[in-house]
Amino acid sequence: MAYLLGVDTGGTYTDAVVLAEKTDTVVATAKALTTRPDLSLGVGAAIDAALAEAGIATSDVAMVSLSTTLATNALVEGQGGRVGLIAIGFDDADLQRSGLTEALGGDPLIRLSGGHNYAGAELAPLDLHALRSALDGMDVEVSGFAVASSFATRNPAHEIAIRDLIRQETGKPVTCSHELSQSLGGPKRALTAVLNARLIGMIDRLITACEGHLHMRGITARLMVVRGDGALISADIAREKPIETILSGPAASVAGASWLSGETDALVSDIGGTTTDVCLLRDGRPMLDPQGARVGPFRTMVEAVAMRTTGLGGDSEVHIVDGLVSALRLGPRRLMPISLAATLYPDPIHAALDRALAHDIPAPDGGQFAIPLWKELPDGLDAREGVIAERLESGPLRLGEAVQSRTENPAIGRLINRGLVMLAGVTPSDASHVLGKLETWDRDAAYKALTLFARRRTGVGQRIAPDAGVLAKMIVDQLTDQTVDCLLQAAFAEDGIDGDPANLAKHPLTMAGLNGHEGVLRMKLSLGVPVVGLGASAHAYYDAVGKRLGTKMIVPQHADVANAIGAVVGQVRMQVSGSLISDSGFTAHLPDGPQRFPSKDAGLEALERALTEAAKAKAIAAGVSVPRVTVNREIKEAEVESQQMFIEATLRVTASGRPRIAHS
C-alpha cells in the first residue's frame, strides 16, 4: 500500500502525519519542536517519529508534501533577509504606494531609467552602466535582489536583462516582479518581489532540511509544497517563489479542517505559536482573496485563500497596557515561552528566575531572556552586535544582562530580526501551564516567571496581579477576547456589513449583543456558523471562545496536526495569464513578450495556445501526468456609434491535477 507523508513546520512545532492512500485514513501523527537555525533537526525528528509510529518501510512513502507558516510569521514579525530593490521607471510617488517604502525598511534601493508603456513599447533605454556602479558599492549583507520595472507584465525585457546581470555579477538570487504576477500595478508587484526576495533564504533552508532528511532515510518520493491558495507546487518552484508559500500553513489548515470535521460551512480558526488564522469555509471550499494575500500590513499580489491573519498565538508576548487599571495585550511578536526555555536550558533559566524572585521588586527587563540560536559565533556583526553575541556565547542570559545599555537595544533588535537571537518571556502557553491546561513543558518555571511578571506596576503603582494564578487567568481571558475579536472581524467582513470590520467587532452594540443585554432593548448576537478550532493549543482555549460567541465549537481529532494533513490532500494547480490589447492593431502579451497580430481572433488563438502550453508544462513539471486544463476569458468592449469595439482581453489558463503517486 502507498502512504502519503505530510509535514508542517510552524513557529513552535513541526508536525508530521502519515496517511494511507487507499483507505484515506490517518495512520500516524508526530510532533517535534521547530529547531532554529538548523531546521533539519526538528523536521527529521517529526518525520522519524511519524514513520516509526506508522511502522511502514520508507519505500512505501509515495509522496511527501510540506506546508509552513515560516514565511507568514516572518512577514508578521518583520523578519527575513536584507534585500536590494532595483526599480526601473518608477517615480517618487510610485515608491510611496502599496507600502513599498515600509517593506524595504531601509534596505538598499537602486533607481534606473527604463521601463515600458501600457502596450509594451520601451519608454527609455535601460541604464546597465548605472546598475554595475551601484552593485560595486552594495552592502555585502544583502542576501538577494528584487527587480521591478514599469509595465513589466507587458514586456519583461528590462527585468530579464537586469536579472541576468545581477546573477552574473553577484551570484545571489534575484526575483523579477513579472515572474510573480501578470497583473498591472507596478508598486504592488515591486512590493511582492521585495517580500519574495526577503524570504528566499528562509524557505530554501527549510526545503533543503526536508530534502536532506528524506534522502538520508532513503525516501525518493517527490517533495511538494503547499501554496497560499491550497494548491501543491514542486519544491523547485517554492525555492524560486517563496512568497507563494505565505499563508501556506493556513491554506493547508483549511483543507485539513474540512477533511477532519466534515463541515462544509464554518469559520476555521487556527491558533499557532505566532498567529491566529481565520477563514470562512463555504460549500466545503475556501474563497480566494480577490485583492491578493494580506499578511500583517502588506497586501501582496499572491493568490491565496481569503484569510485574516493576526499576530496572536499561544506564544505571543504579553504586554501591559499603560493606564490606571490592570490591562493586558497579546502579540504580535512571538517569544519562546519561559516553560519551553526552561525545558531546553533548565539550569540557567531556573537560577536566573530564583535570583530575581529573591528581591521583591519588579524586574526591569520584564523577566525576559535572550536565547542564542547559532552553533558558531556568526560573521558580519558590527561592534555592538559582537559584544552582545560574546556575552551569549555561554548560553541564555536575562535580557538585562545581555543588553547593558540603551545604545545596545537596536543591536539586539537586529540580531533578533536576523534569526540569531530569540527572546523568551511570559506567554499564554506559560499561563496555561500554571492553570493546568497544558502539561508539555516546565510548569515550575512558568509559575516563577508569572510570579515575577505579576510584580510589575500599573500607572498608579499597584501590582498588575496579586499572584501567578490570577495573572494566568487574566492572560488566558485576554487570549479569549482577542480570538473572539478575530472571528467577529472575519464574520463582519464576510457579511459585507457597512463599516470597518475592526471597528464593528469592538462596537458597544456588538458587545451588548454578546453580553445578552436585557433592558428596554433586548439584544443578542452570535455567530451563524460553527467554528472549527485547530492548533496544538486549541483544546486549551477554544471552549471559552465558542461560549462567548454563542456557537458550536468543533475541535476535531487530530486538530493539532491539521496543517500536515491538509498538506497531502491538495492538488497541483498552475495558472498562467496574458492579455490581448487593441492599439492600432492587436498586441498579444505572451509569456515570452509582446507579439503583433493582424486580427483579434488570430491574437486570441495564439495567446490561448501559448498560455495553455505554458500552464501544462508547469503542471507536468510539478508531477501531474495528464493535466486538466480550463480557460477563463474576460473580454472588454465598448459601444461606439452602435458598434461593439474591442478594447482588451485577459486570458487565464489553469492546468490542474493530482501529483503522480509512485507506488512501490
Image: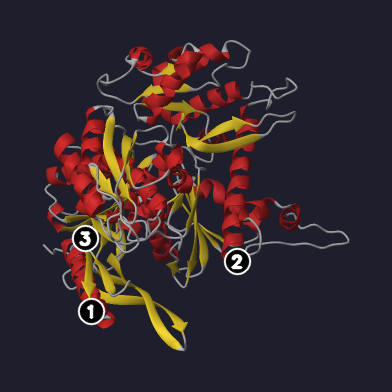
Disc 3 is placed on an element classified as strand
Which of the numbered marks, if any, corresponds to residue 3?
A: 3
Above or below, 556 against 438 in this view is below
Mark with earlier residue (2, 3):
3
Circle 1 residue: 598
Identify which amino acid the numbered label 1 is placed on. Answer: Pro
Circle 2 residue: 495
Disc 1 is placed on an element classified as loop
Q: Residues within 10 Å of mark 2 (few under 14, many from 20)?
A: few
Mark with earlier residue (2, 1):
2
Mark with earlier residue (3, 1):
3
Q: Residue at x 42, y 30 (%)?
A: 340
Identify which amino acid the numbered label 2 is placed on. Answer: Asp
Task: Residue at the far right: name it.
Answer: 520
Identify which amino acid the numbered label 3 is placed on. Answer: Tyr
The one nearer the camera, 626 or 610, is 610
Q: Residue at x 24, y 77 (%)?
A: 603
User: Whole-Å distance between the Cαs marked 3 and 1?
Assistant: 53 Å
Kindly tell me whether residue 157 is visible in this rendering: yes
Above or below, 141 against 497 in this view is above
Q: What is the x, y in percent for residue 32?
A: 33, 40
